[in-house]
Amino acid sequence: IVRHTGGISYHVHYTITDEDDNKSRPYMLLGDAGEMSLKTARELARIVLALADKGVDPQDSMRPKLMADLLAKGDKWRP
């Protein structure tokens, strides 16, 4: 995605189907183009898509760890 500021970032869209066959199509930020190669972004995208094909939403899987990190580190937390 190219932002209005000129910054470029890599994202991946994937499809998740729940137990009622409802589909959602979230997207996930992989990283900024200045900090990550296109090759790495593509590799990460393939992994995210493979997980989604198995019914695993990578963003849902990351949330519990993030919340625990935020509670432990408070406003000192950094990505």
Image: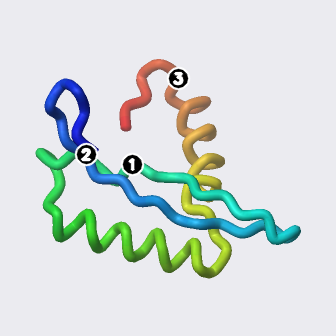
At a point 72% along the width and 69% down the height, the residue shown is 17
Q: Is residue 33 left or right of residue 44?
A: left
Question: Can you give x and y, in whole percent of width and height, for residue 5 in the image?
Answer: 18, 25
Q: Are marks 2 and 3 in contact (CB under 8 Å)?
A: no
Q: Is residue 13 left or right of residue 2?
A: right
Q: Quadrant of the N terminus?
A: top left
SS under mark 2: strand
Q: How is the image coloured?
A: rainbow
At a point 27% along the width and 70% down the height, the residue shown is 42
**Residue type, label 1:** Leu
Q: CA distance from mark 3 to mark 1?
A: 23 Å
SS under mark 3: helix
Q: Looking at the picture, does residue 40 appear above or below residue 60?
A: below
Tell me, for residue 29, which label it has, or none: 1
The residue that mark 2 highlights is 9
The residue that mark 3 highlights is 74
